[in-house]
Amino acid sequence: MRFITFEKHDGTIRSGVLLDSDLVIDMREATDGKLPGCMIEFLEQSESNMRIAKGLLQLSLGDKGAYPLNKVRLLAPLPHPKSFRDFYAFEQHVKSARENRGLEMIPEWYQIPVFYFSNHLAIKGPEDKISKPADCHWLDYELEVACIIGKQGRNITAQEAEDYIFGYCILNDWSARDLQRQEMKVGLGPAKGKDFATSIGPWIISKDEMEPLRLGKGFDISMKARINGILLSEGNMKDIYYSFGEMIERASTGVTLYPGELIGSGTVGTGCILELGTEVHRWLQPGDEVELEIDKLGVLKNSIIEVR
C-alpha cells in the first residue's frame, strides 16, 4: 500500500492511500472515522489500523472518500515526524566524498553505523520549493531511502527490527556544504548545514511491498537523481553496507523509538555533488529542479528558490 498526505480543494489536509488507478482515498472519510485523518495517529496504532486500511484497496471513483489524484495536492507523506535521524550507511559515498577532500577512509566507520539528528520540523514534500540559505554558496542534494518506525521499542536487535518498520520513502537530505564544513571543523554537527530542509515523498510504501525485492542488506531498487532533467546520480540500494535493521539496533540502544520516527539511510554512491565533484556539476542554484527517482518509491521533485 502507498500512504500519502494530501490537501483537498477546500484546503483540508488528510492522510490516505494512493491506489494504482491514481485514485486517492481519504482514509478517515472512507471509514467514517474508524481510521484517523493524519499519518502520525495512524502509525501510533499501525498494526490494527492496517487491517482496516486494506479494505480501502477495493474502493473506486464515486465511493465515499475517493478523489482523483489530479484533484488534490500531495504533501510530505509524514509532514511532522517525531524525530529524524540520518545515517551514513553506503560505503561508496563515504569513501568517494572523503577522497574528494583529500581524506582517507575512517576505520571506525566499519565498527558502528553512525547518525546525526536533523530538524524534523523542516520537512518538505513533493513539488515544494526549497529556499537556499542566504549565506550558502555550496547547496547540494542527497539521494537517500528512509524508513518509518511503526511500533514502539527499545534495545531492538537487528534481527527483530523488521517488526518495527512500517514502510519506506524517498528522502532528499538537502545540504549547505560550505556551512557544514565550517561548523564541523569545531567538532560538532552537522547542524546549520542541514537544518533548513529535508524532502520526503511522494508516498510511504508499506514494508510488505518491498519484501520481494530484498537483496543483501537492502533491496534491489534503482536510485537516480536528475538536475534540470540531466541524470547525475545512479545507484542501487542493494549496495548498502549497514541494513536498516542494524541502524535501528544502534538508534534504539538504551533509547525508546516511537511510531512516527524517521530514519534515513545516508547517501547512495554517486548520490550528491560533493561526491561527484563540481567538475561534473556546479552547486545548486535558484531555478534548478532536482528530481529523485527510486523504484517502487516514486519520484520526488523540488525546485530551488532564492531567500528573500
Image (cartoon, rainbow, N blue to C red):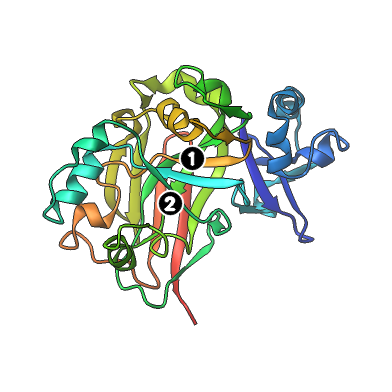
Decide: is 106 above or below 34.
below
For marks 1 and 2, give the one nearer the viewer.
1
Q: Residue at x 55, y 32 (%)?
A: 167
Task: Give the image location of residue 159, x and y in percent.
Answer: 46, 17
Q: Amino acid at mark 2?
A: Asn
Q: Is residue 97 visible?
A: yes
Task: Give the image location of residue 197, x and y in percent.
Answer: 48, 60
Quadrant in which residue 222 is drawn: top left
Q: Is residue 62 visible?
A: no
Decide: is 277 above or below 52.
below
- Residue occupying the far right of the picture: 32
Q: Residue at x 38, y 31 (%)?
A: 221
Q: Residue at x 52, y 22 (%)?
A: 162
Residue 263 badge: 1
Q: Image quadrant for the N terminus?
A: top right
Quadrant in which residue 36 is drawn: top right
Residue 96 badge: none
- Residue occupying the far bottom of the picture: 308
Q: Is residue 201 left or right of residue 111?
A: right
Decide: is 287 above or below 238.
below
Secondary structure at numbered mark 2: strand
Residue 172 badge: 2
Task: Give the image location of residue 2, x and y in percent.
Answer: 60, 35
Quadrant in which residue 111 is drawn: top left
Distance, label 1 to label 2, CA atoms, is 12 Å
Q: Amino acid at mark 1?
A: Ile
Disc nearer the start of the sequence (1/2): 2
- Residue occupying the far front of the picture: 254
